[in-house]
């Protein structure tokens, strides 16, 4: 029996979760919300995490009705992510580990997402689409590693959505992506956007610059072109832009997932990561799966969006399979690829 | 028509065209996509596939002959290689049947040939767009199907296009490298052998293309991957 406490703070969420043998005992989270038109910066995000981490840990312990002595391992996010917020989680985890004399374990953030998704949905060996603010990857397990078959060659899908939300000044509460999703529901007209798929890889930066120009032609970066245009350009509504952006980029994601399914001869898909709780993306993926006799596994925002529980769960699996970490190795790293982790807890 | 399998883009059937046994690829309507986007993509890809086939033929590169296309029915009728297996299968077989050292020698030979063909594609400005070992067919020459002598046939040109620039060629190589590393992770040498042969055949822009490829690769590594 492994009982683990996990701390996640790689981006603008700070979360604490407690899990005991796959049973969720606590999962609490705070999000650092910036004003419309602004993104979250490392320093301010770290300050936010510093302010809330103590009360979150107390709250998690209270909800789980456990004492520190009941815990077997303290887990924290080792990377990838922004360094200052990551450090808050690591420092608190180290302190707790020394204070309570409990082993410490650093967890790869992406692995946390995958293992959480597998636990909640019961998917055994799916193709994983991991979509969030910083990551866009199509992953499949083979021979003790989660291998990356496809990914973005420039910015992540969530980054593309967040930045577009900033341009049209959408609220960041609860998240920019959620607000785009709501506006998109009212969109009617499909506006043609670039569609960029390269094998199992995708690219979003060209789409973002294109839609930036559509949303605000006055800021068009190519000034020479602007001078030539004399005719009035059609005005696009925010709703239609959101709708078209979602339709285009989600179609790209579904396409590369399908390509990975055909390449790996797999029939199951699991969507994880913050963008994964978008219902339109889930719907599109479900239709694709049905059209090829496959099955979709998706999870809701409690487990999809960054949370402490996923770090606790992945850490517990590592701990159970014998992984240990010395105190000297309890650093954080901004770059930590999914395929760097040796998956000791899976035998298939 | 007899359905062979459902690939990434459409369904494959075994059909007959003017008395010739052929493969029918139907890019059926993808209901998850917006209808306008779906029609646009499907037309683009069918056209790309037929264009690339004739370009390959002119360049002396083996690709399935296109017998007939039907944009309204979303179908392409093309040459069928019944005996062929994918390069992915061949690599897995070689690895299973031989010692590590022998496998590397056998695969080096295969990779050199594949690299040469990709070099020829790029020298003719044909960008494949989806280079993976699933999209390379190994067609045995002899009757006994021992795969000692074979032709290498490139397939699935749906994402292909014509471009002279080094950027697209670099991305094409990057896609290939990534596909090899994820699919054949135990044989990390495959791409190096391919690249070695590629450099000899890809034409006068060799230096620029390889530099671009390194740049595209660096873009991937530099990405911070937050959250």
Image (spheres, coloured by chain):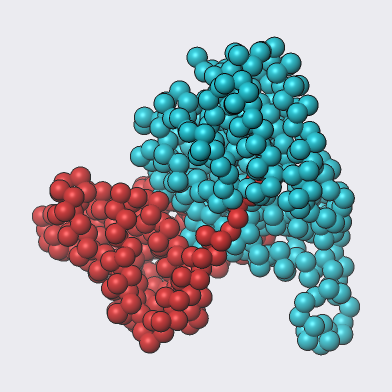
What's the residue at 75%, 58% (across, down)? A163
Q: Colour of chain B?
A: red
Q: Quadrant of the C terminus of chain A?
A: top left
Give the side of residue A171 with respect to residue A195, left or right: right
Residue B92 percent location from the top left of the image: 26, 48
Q: Nearer the viewer, residue B99 or B168?
A: B99
Residue B215 percent location from the top left of the image: 50, 71
Give the side of residue B222 with respect to residue B137, left or right: right
What's the residue at 20%, 45% (across, down)? B96
Tell me the quarter of the picture where residue A173 sits.
top right
Q: Nearer the viewer, residue B20 or B103?
A: B103
What's the residue at 29%, 59% (across, down)? B189
Residue A47 percent location from the top left of the image: 78, 43
Q: Is residue A343 above or below residue A62?
A: below
Q: Is residue A240 above or below residue B62?
A: above
Tell me the quarter of the picture where residue A194 sits.
bottom right
Residue A74 seen in the current view = yes
Residue A270 seen in the current view = no
Q: Colour of chain A?
A: cyan
Give the side of residue A61 with respect to residue A151, left or right: right
Q: Nearer the viewer, residue A75 or A215?
A: A75
Q: Nearer the viewer, residue B215 or A328?
A: A328
What's the residue at 69%, 54% (across, down)? A159
Residue B114 percent location from the top left of the image: 29, 67
């Amino acid at each position: 029996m492994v009982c683990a406490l996990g701390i996640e703070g790689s981006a603008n969420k700070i979360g604490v979760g407690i899990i005991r043998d796959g049973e969720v005992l606590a999962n609490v989270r705070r999000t650092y919300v910036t004003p419309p038109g602004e993104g979250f910066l490392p320093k301010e995000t770290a300050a936010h995490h510093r302010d809330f981490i103590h009360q979150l840990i107390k709250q998690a312990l209270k909800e789980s009705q456990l004492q520190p002595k009941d815990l077997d391992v303290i887990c924290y996010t080792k990377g990838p992510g922004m360094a200052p917020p990551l450090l808050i989680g690591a420092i608190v985890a180290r302190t707790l580990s020394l204070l309570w004399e409990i082993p410490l374990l650093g967890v790869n953030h992406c692995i946390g997402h995958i293992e959480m998704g597998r636990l909640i949905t019961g998917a055994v060996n799916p193709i994983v689409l991991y979509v969030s603010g910083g990551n866009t990857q199509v992953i499949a397990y083979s021979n003790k590693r989660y291998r990356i078959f496809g990914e973005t060659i420039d910015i992540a899908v969530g980054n593309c959505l967040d930045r577009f939300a900033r341009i049209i000044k959408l609220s960041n509460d609860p998240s920019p992506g959620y607000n785009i999703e709501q506006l998109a529901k009212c969109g009617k007209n499909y506006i043609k956007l670039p569609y960029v798929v390269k094998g199992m890889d995708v690219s979003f930066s060209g789409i973002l610059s294109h839609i930036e120009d559509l949303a605000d032609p006055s800021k068009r970066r190519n000034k020479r072109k602007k001078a030539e245009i004399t005719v009035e350009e059609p005005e696009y509504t925010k709703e239609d832009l959101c709708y078209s952006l979602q339709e285009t980029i989600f179609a790209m994601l579904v396409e590369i997932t399908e390509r990975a399914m055909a390449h790996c001869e797999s029939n199951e898909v699991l969507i994880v990561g913050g963008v994964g709780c978008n219902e339109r993306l889930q719907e599109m993926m479900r239709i694709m799966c049905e059209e090829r006799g496959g099955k979709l596994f998706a999870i809701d925002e409690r487990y999809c969006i960054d949370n402490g529980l996923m770090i606790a769960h992945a850490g517990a699996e590592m701990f159970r399979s014998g992984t240990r970490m010395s105190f000297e190795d309890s650093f954080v790293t901004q770059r930590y690829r999914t395929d760097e982790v040796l998956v000791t807890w899976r035998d298939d | 028509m007899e359905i062979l399998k459902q690939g990434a883009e459409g369904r494959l059937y075994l059909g007959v065209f003017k008395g010739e046994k052929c493969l029918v690829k139907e890019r059926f309507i993808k209901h998850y996509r917006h209808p306008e986007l779906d029609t646009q993509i499907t037309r683009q890809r069918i056209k790309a596939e037929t264009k690339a086939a004739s370009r390959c033929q002119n360049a002396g590169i083996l690709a399935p002959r296109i017998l007939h296309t039907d944009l309204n029915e979303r179908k392409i009728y093309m040459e069928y290689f019944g005996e062929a297996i994918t390069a992915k299968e061949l690599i897995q077989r070689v690895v299973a049947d031989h010692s590590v050292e022998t496998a590397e020698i056998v695969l080096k030979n295969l990779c050199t040939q594949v690299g040469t063909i990709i070099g020829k594609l790029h020298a003719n400005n044909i960008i494949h767009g989806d280079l993976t070992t699933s999209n390379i067919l190994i067609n045995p020459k002899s009757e006994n199907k021992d795969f000692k002598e074979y032709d290498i046939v490139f397939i699935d040109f749906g994402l292909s296009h014509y471009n002279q620039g080094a950027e697209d060629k670099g991305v094409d190589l990057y896609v290939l490298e990534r596909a090899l590393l994820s699919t054949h992770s135990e044989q990390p040498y495959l791409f190096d052998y391919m690249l070695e042969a590629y450099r000899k055949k890809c034409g006068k822009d060799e230096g620029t293309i390889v530099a671009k490829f390194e740049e595209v690769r660096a873009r991937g590594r530099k990405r911070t991957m937050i959250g």
